[in-house]
């Protein structure tokens, strides 16, 4: 039976760790804005097209 | 990418040979604004494009469709007052020697391109170190090096990019900040309660399945102990608000829904502890945690607010933060609160007059649209009193302040008691009334059973039955009905343009039997009037020339005429002269036009042959020195409003309170019904007083209005709904905001609010049935933990499902859905 007690103790510790993580992220304001991040993640990080090469290829497309 | 899209726009040339603006996508009226082979409709759009292209930010045009908002009518604001330390202090959120943080509300933010651009501000000005957008709240938070860039420069940059910040002082912002904190706490409560609830359920599983037998007693004890530990945060953190509210209600001797909830929670907790400690069983801690968890979810569901709307603004949000005051040597910016009678102020075009003042110098053409509802600017002569809230249109004027800002004709409205009273929000009066009776009945049954079992079977059994009845009777379903019904309805209504402050408003809407309407801006369209011409027929060529002449004037009447006579090919205007407050004189195509008042025509020796004698707004026309006829202006009513008013008048008593003249009484009376009352020339205070008179007769009033002149009446009414053409527009404090294009759905909205009450009533019957079943099982002494564990969440979930489904069905039936 003691094995259950050890397991329970470990599972509670693990669960508590997640709870603390949740509380910290809440306090940091991670849940304050839930609408912007979903749009922000769609942006490309690359800089806008530069130089003549890319411009020429784009003109070809048109 | 950006270049491709921009080029596509450029190639898209209209049939008339005119291009499409590369920034906003509107048609360009001419090719006057060109930059890097691209055409723009106006200077503003070109400026934005120049800034973006020189900073390699043209990707802006490739992220979303039509990201740029047109800048045709936008004027660059004056942010010089932000240099004043006392104003900057109010706006800044944080400040030290090097850095400062500020948040701006940007009403123009509308798409993902906006987010992208606003978060790249550091590329335009490196002194801005962090910029973060909250799209839902239309807010940007900036961290910047205060040594290198000033607050004013940042505001000017945002304005130049097409996002004029709506600057509010800290006092205005504190409301939203407090709401944010409340929301954070609630989510935290839900998180922690949910965590504990799940774990308690887990540890209770052996109990549900009756797995324990003697050798495993030690594990049983351990599980029960863990449950107690887990239930402590549920009770003292998650359930704290309910216990507190219940206690408060008892102290105030006002039994509401919080009382039976608090009693239920306490009974569950103390009975479970007693059972565990005295080793009688393992208690109902799972039910307690589940109950609080569902209650919190219900609260969260109803509490969702519209971050971008503020329902409690007063005139201060509309007035400027600072004004220009004359000093010995020049002028200075001064915060509006520090303006004292006797000060001399400079008011420029489109600026508001902040306090009742005397006109000292300049041509005053004051638009009192917000004070009286009258759309036409009024001209004033030197020495006239100008009222606070009027907007100067035309050149700069100099005025001397007569009264302090807060004591002026319009603003003194806010000094009244009704604006000081902070109304206590009960989320549902209906539920409170029912739960009052419910509480007494349950307490009665419990006490009777206690006495009966005590006599029959001793104290221990009696206490057990007493506690069980209180536990089972805990009105979980009762408490969940209203939040979920209203919460879902608020969401459905918001989709079709009616944004309500909270669920209570729906309940109040259902009780309304009297509707009070404002005319200008509510029933009619702002900034647009219907023009009719009476007189000698104007030939086509002359009509085109007339259109060209009046186009040069910015006066609303001229614009209305110009709209009527606008043609593709307009002749050049050879001569143009504007007489403020009187009219215009102009020459085009060799024809001479005089459009304006009788005085103006007389000045040019033209006799007005057919003067208009009724009270309506008019302008006379003379062509080549000969009297031609007159233009009559009337309000343009919103489309379909006649039908809506007829529909409303069949069910409600209608009253019209207008700040305008009674010129249109004959037209309105039949629309509003025979029993309606129409009152004209109403000042803001009159509107409020007349509304109070209706209320004293025992009526529940819904007020529909716009603008500051209705603010008093909106506040006084049971349900005050502001009508606005777009949700970014300023609207006064109210219970809700209605998108003007959906005003025709008002009868359906009102009907839907009544449906809501019906839904709640029928769900109360269901939940009472649950309670009755539960109580009978408990009174019989048959309630096992398993039945309790099933009954409690089952009743909650079924109620939640039932009301959500019912509100959706009713919304569809009433036509409150978006047409796709």
Image: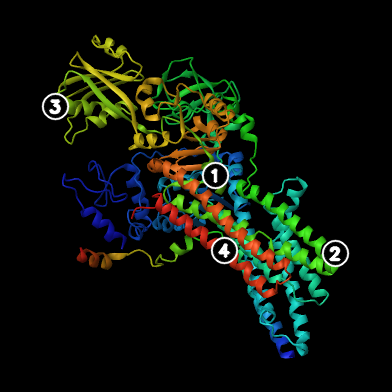
Identify which residue, B752 or B703, lies in the foreground. B752
Quadrant in the rendering for residue B597? top left
Q: Is residue B62 shown left or right of residue B660?
A: left
Q: Local crowd at mark 1 within 10 Å, few (<14), some, or many (≥20)?
A: many
Of all chains, the one bearing label 2 is B
Residue labelled with disc 1: B505
SS type, badge 4: loop
Residue labelled with disc 4: A30
Q: How many marks?
A: 4
Q: If the image is split into quadrants, where does the C terminus of chain B sit?
A: bottom left
Q: Nearer the viewer, mark 1 or mark 4?
A: 1
N-terminal label among 2 and 3: 2
Q: Is residue B145 something one can see in this rendering?
A: no
| Residue name at image x 25 percent, y 54 percent | B9
In the rendered image, residue B679, in percent from the top left (x then y), is placed at 46, 23
Gap between marks 2 and 3, in whole Å?
105 Å
Residue labelled with disc 2: B455
Quadrant in the rendering for residue A54? bottom left
Q: Local crowd at mark 4 within 10 Å, few (<14), some, or many (≥20)?
A: few
Q: Local crowd at mark 2 within 10 Å, few (<14), some, or many (≥20)?
A: few
Q: Is residue B480 above or below residue B657?
A: below
Identify which residue, B705 or B313, lies in the foreground. B705
In the rendered image, residue A32, in percent from the top left (x then y), is placed at 56, 59
């Amino acid at each position: 039976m003691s094995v259950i007690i050890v397991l329970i103790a470990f599972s509670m510790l693990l669960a508590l760790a997640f709870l603390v993580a949740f509380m910290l992220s809440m306090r940091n304001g991670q849940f304050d804005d839930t609408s912007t991040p979903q749009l922000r993640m769609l942006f490309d990080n690359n800089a806008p097209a530069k130089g003549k090469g890319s411009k020429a290829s784009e003109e070809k497309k048109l | 990418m950006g270049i491709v899209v921009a080029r596509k726009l450029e190639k898209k040339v209209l049939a008339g040979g005119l291009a499409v603006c590369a920034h906003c996508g509107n048609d360009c009226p001419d090719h006057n604004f060109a930059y890097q082979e691209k055409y723009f409709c106006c200077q503003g759009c070109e400026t934005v494009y120049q800034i973006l292209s020189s900073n390699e930010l043209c990707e802006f045009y490739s992220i979303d469709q039509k990201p740029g908002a047109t800048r045709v009518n936008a004027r660059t604001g004056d942010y010089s007052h932000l240099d004043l330390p006392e104003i900057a202090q109010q706006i800044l959120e944080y400040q030290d020697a090097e850095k400062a943080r500020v948040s701006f509300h940007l009403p123009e933010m509308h798409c993902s391109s906006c987010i992208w651009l606003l978060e790249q501000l550091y590329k335009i000005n490196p002194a801005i170190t962090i910029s973060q957008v909250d799209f839902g709240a239309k807010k940007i938070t900036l961290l910047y090096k205060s040594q290198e860039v000033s607050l004013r420069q940042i505001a000017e940059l945002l304005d130049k990019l097409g996002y004029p910040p709506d600057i509010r002082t800290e006092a205005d912002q504190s409301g939203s900040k407090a709401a944010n904190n409340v929301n954070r706490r609630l989510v935290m409560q839900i998180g922690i309660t949910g965590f504990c609830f799940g774990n308690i359920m887990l540890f209770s599983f052996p109990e549900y399945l009756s797995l324990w037998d003697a050798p495993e007693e030690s594990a049983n004890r351990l599980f029960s102990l863990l449950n107690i530990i887990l239930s402590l945060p549920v009770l003292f953190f998650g359930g704290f608000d309910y216990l507190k509210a219940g206690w408060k209600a008892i102290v105030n001797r006002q039994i509401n829904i919080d009382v039976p909830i608090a009693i239920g929670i306490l009974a569950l907790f103390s009975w479970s502890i007693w059972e565990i400690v005295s080793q009688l069983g393992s208690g109902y801690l799972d039910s307690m945690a589940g109950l609080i968890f569902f209650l919190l979810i219900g609260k969260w569901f109803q509490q969702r607010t519209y971050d971008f709307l503020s329902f409690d603004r007063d005139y201060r949000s509309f007035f400027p933060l600072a004004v220009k005051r004359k000093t010995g040597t020049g002028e200075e910016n001064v915060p509006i609160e520090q303006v004292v009678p006797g000060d001399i102020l400079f008011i420029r075009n489109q600026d508001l007059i902040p306090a009742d003042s005397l006109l000292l110098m300049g041509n005053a053409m004051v638009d009192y649209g917000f004070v009286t509802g009258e759309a036409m600017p009024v001209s004033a002569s030197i020495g006239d009193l100008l009222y606070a809230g009027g907007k100067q249109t035309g050149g700069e004027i100099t005025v001397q302040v007569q009264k302090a800002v807060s004591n002026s004709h319009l603003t003194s409205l806010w000094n009244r008691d009704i604006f000081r009273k902070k109304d206590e929000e009960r989320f549902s009066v209906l539920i409170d009334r029912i739960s009052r009776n419910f509480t007494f009945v349950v307490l009665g049954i419990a006490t009777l059973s206690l006495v009966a079992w005590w006599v029959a079977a001793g104290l221990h059994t009696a206490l057990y039955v007493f506690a069980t009845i209180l536990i089972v009777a805990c009105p979980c379903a009762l408490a969940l009905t209203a939040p979920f019904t209203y919460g879902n309805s608020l969401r459905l209504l918001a989709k079709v343009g009616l944004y309500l402050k909270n669920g209570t408003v729906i309940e109040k809407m259902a009780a309304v039997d009297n509707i009070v309407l404002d005319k200008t801006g509510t029933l009619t369209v702002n900034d647009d009037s219907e023009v009719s011409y009476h007189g000698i027929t104007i030939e086509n060529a002359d009509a085109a020339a007339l259109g060209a002449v009046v186009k040069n004037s910015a006066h609303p009447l001229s614009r209305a005429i110009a709209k009527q006579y606008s043609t593709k090919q307009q002749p050049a205007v050879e001569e143009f002269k504007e007489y403020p407050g009187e009219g215009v004189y102009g020459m085009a195509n060799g024809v001479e036009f005089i459009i304006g008042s009788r005085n103006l025509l007389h000045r040019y020796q033209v006799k007005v042959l057919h003067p208009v004698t009724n009270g309506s707004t008019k302008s006379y026309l003379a062509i080549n020195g000969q009297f031609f006829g007159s233009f009559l202006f009337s309000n343009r009513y919103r489309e379909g409003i006649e039908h809506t008013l007829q529909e409303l008048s069949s069910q409600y008593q209608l009253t019209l309170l207008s700040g305008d003249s009674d010129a249109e009484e004959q037209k309105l009376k039949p629309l509003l019904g025979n029993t309606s009352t129409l009152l004209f020339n109403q000042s803001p205070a009159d509107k409020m007083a007349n509304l109070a008179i209706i209320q004293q007769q025992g009526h529940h009033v819904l007020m529909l209005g716009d603008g500051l002149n209705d603010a008093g009446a909106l506040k006084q009414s049971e349900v005050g709904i502001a009508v606005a053409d777009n949700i970014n527009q300023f609207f006064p404090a109210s219970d809700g905001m209605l998108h003007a294009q959906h005003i025709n759905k008002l009868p359906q909205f009102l009907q839907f609010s009544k449906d809501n009450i019906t839904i709640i009533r029928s769900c109360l019957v269901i939940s009472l049935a649950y309670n009755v079943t539960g109580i009978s099982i408990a009174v019989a002494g048959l309630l096992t933990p398993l039945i309790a564990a099933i009954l409690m969440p089952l009743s909650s979930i079924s109620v939640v499902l039932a009301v959500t489904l019912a509100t959706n069905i009713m919304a569809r039936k009433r036509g409150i859905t978006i047409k796709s």
